Image (cartoon, rainbow, N blue to C red):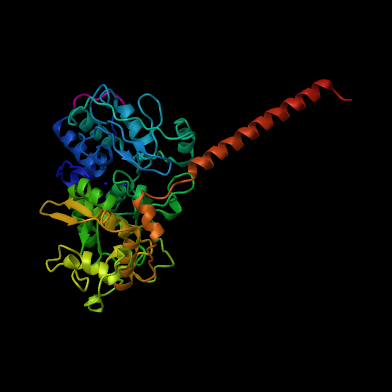
Amino acid sequence: MKLMTCLHVNLGATVLALASFNVYSAAAPGPANADMVKRGEYLATAGDCIACHTAPGGKAMAGGLSLPTPLGPIVSTNITSSKTHGIGNYTLEQFSDALRKGIRADGRHLYPAMPYTSYAKVTDDDVQALYAYFMQAVAPVDAAAPATALPFPFNIRLSMAGWNLLFLDKQPFTPDASKSPEWNRGAYLTLGLAHCSTCHTPRNVLMAENLSRELGGGEVGTWHAPNITSDANSGIGGWSAQEIVDYMRVGHTANKAQAAGPMAEAVDNSLRHLTDGDLRAIATYLKSVPAQHDAADTTATYAWGAAADDLNSIRGVALPTDPNQMTGPQLYDAQCATCHQARGQGSFDGGLPPLFHNTALGRTNINNLVMVMLDGIQRKTDSDEVLMPGFKKELSDQQIATLGNYLTKNFGNPAAVVSVDQVKTLRAGGSSSNLVTVARVGMGAFIIVIIAAIFGFNRRKRRNAQGPI
């Protein structure tokens, strides 16, 4: 799916694995014990609920975060225990329906920006633990989040009922007896609470996940969620299980990748708080996901490039009067070399990554590189702070494109191209969607067909009433 503080609960992986496959009674539950509430807190952390349901500067779980989608912004709701503006009056059954079916207590449908298509895999027992946590441990915030106001026809929430018939699999996760307990735990978390496919799977024209390309890479606003299947070049097949665990734990794997944008938020809010056992289970499952290969990936995305120093070419050369005419080496020397060093090798202590052998420069989809140059990276780990300044205010679209192309040609995949139009579009928040127009045209065509059918039916009825001529 990216910003807030996350609660950290350290539970034993064995207890969690066993607890995930029980069943709860349909009767209204009484007050939960402390262990259940703590387990629910852990599960909510695994589900990264706080990321979407907390606005910048707002109170935890109180909603109000505007989530950009191709249909327009969807505003997250208040999911605190408030009885006036939150979910404090929800029964366990209503909570389960919202979580796993996308249906609120008032019967209205949620939009799938809330990943209920993934949460549908959550077991009954874990739903009960989540319910206990939200009802007994999440402080109530008696404030309403702004309402979502999508354009017609998407403002008709009942339309989601048809979408759910087509794309919602209501079957909870069923363990595969032929696989190990670790694999099953990883599959349960990846497919369910961690909802990895929500971001890492491409969408079809109806904005549903294209499961034929599951985890093969998707788009999250202006960011690209890369292929995380077992393919050695396009995905993470060349990563060891430990490297995957390290990436989820700290957001960085040496000589391969570092987290930014939405993935950095997933690490900070959720993944780094999971037990080592659960992280290793997720890694085990991801290593088994069927490979999705892009023919353009002739080399592993992390294997491109080498150290290179082109700065001698600009020594003694005057800067152009027009900043947009600055060359790649001039821009690199001015903006990047201080931290990433002249040869792109990164800082001596490893805190700042090298630019070669770096997936950010190894993909042909180069949106993430552009977004990092525009917005930078700022995140805090348990031990230190990761900071890269953004150049949105300092560099023009032309300068970002020039610098980006210099980086890919010298340190990354030379087939990756950064265009001025691409930078301009990403700076503005991404390309506009024609889904609203398509939906309106489609609805208009459907209405015309219905009217024509009614007209034809009435005409035949009149002819039959007149009898043979």
Picture coordinates of residue 401 (x, y %)? Answer: 34, 63
Confirm whether residue 215 shows in the render. no
In the image, farthest residue toward the right:
469
The range drawn in magenta is 26-31
Q: Residue furthest left?
A: 383
The reply to whether the magenta stretch includes residue 40 is: no
Left or right of residue 43: residue 415: right
Residue at coordinates 53% horizontally, 42% vertically from top-left? Answer: 438
What percent of the width, then of the height, locates residue 177? 33, 50
Q: Residue at x 15, y 67 (%)?
A: 347
Q: Residue at x 64, y 34 (%)?
A: 448
Residue 30 within the magenta-colored segment of the rendering:
yes
- Hey, which quadrant is residue 18 in on the image? top left
Q: Main secondary structure of the magenta part?
A: loop
Answer with the quarter of the image where residue 399 lies: bottom left
Tell me the quarter of the picture where residue 136 sits.
Answer: top left
* Residue 445 in view here: yes
Quarter that holds the C terminus: top right
326 shown above or below 88: below
- For image coordinates 24% across by 44% down, the residue present is 46
Residue 429 versus residue 37: which sits nearer the camera? 429
- Place of residue 28 in the rendered image (x, y in percent of width and height, measured from the top left): 27, 23
86 or 192: which is nearer to us?
Answer: 86
Residue 193 image offset from top left, x and y in percent? 29, 43
How many numbered marks does the figure carry?
A: 0
Which residue in the rendered view is the most extreme toward the front?
321
